[in-house]
Image: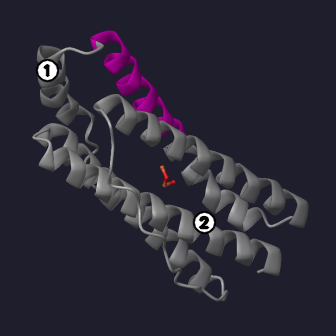
Amino acid sequence: MHASIENLLNDQIKVEATASMHYLAMASWADAEGFSGVANFFYAQSEEEREHMLKLVKFVNERGGKVVVPALDQPTDKFTSLKALFEKFLDSEVFVTKQINTIIDTCLEQKDYNTNNFMQWYVTEQLEEEATARTLLDKLNIIGDNNSGYYLFDRDIESFIQPQE
Ligand code: OFO
């Protein structure tokens, strides 16, 4: 595996691990605020991101590369509102998509079609996750500042939890 690809995949391991920890902090905030549906959604998202990280760790090892298990910064656990929480979720997913696109650009430059093929799974996944984040944020924008709206949002969000693979 080309060193530039190995480095980018290691960066991506860190990006996925960071997302997992951010979503865990978001789940915990929602749990403490009494939004149990939102908490369950982010606990599941955190698990998913860990799976994404693991998939990369295994791929780099299979291809004979060297995995660097990253040190992570402490995620923020202070949010001013549900809307702020979901804005952060969308920003995080948009950032992940950008990173994935950079890896794919480099794979094509280096003619690493194998890694390119592997990364296509992430492209599809990101499409879904960004769409989910946008849909949920749209709902919160419609709700505005309304407690009964929050109650229904918290109840209905459970239907957005993807079954674990
Ligand atoms: Fe949605 O972040 Fe992983 O890929």
User: Could one spot residue 87 in this view of the protein?
Assistant: yes
Mark 2 is on which residue type?
A: Gln
In this picture, which residue range is highlighted in magenta?
Answer: 126-143
Residue 152: mark: 1
Tag 1's secondary structure? helix
Instruction: Identify whether 36 is placed above or below 111.
Output: above
Image quadrant in which the C terminus is located: bottom left
97 left or right of 128 in image:
right
Q: Residues within 10 Å of mark 2 (few under 14, many from 20)?
A: many
Q: Nearer the viewer, residue 118 or 145?
A: 145
Mark 1 is on which residue type?
A: Leu
- Residue 75, quarter of picture: bottom left
Furthest toward the right, the residue is 109
Q: Position of residue 60 (x, y in %)?
A: 61, 79
Magenta stretch: includes residue 141: yes
Q: Position of residue 80 (x, y in %)?
A: 32, 37
Residue 140: mark: none
114 left or right of 161 in image:
right
Residue topped by disc 2: 12
Magenta stretch: includes residue 134: yes
Q: Residue at x 18, y 35 (%)?
A: 158
**In front of the other: label 1 or label 2?**
1
Image quadrant in which the N terminus is located: bottom right
Cα distance in 3D space between marks 1 and 2: 35 Å
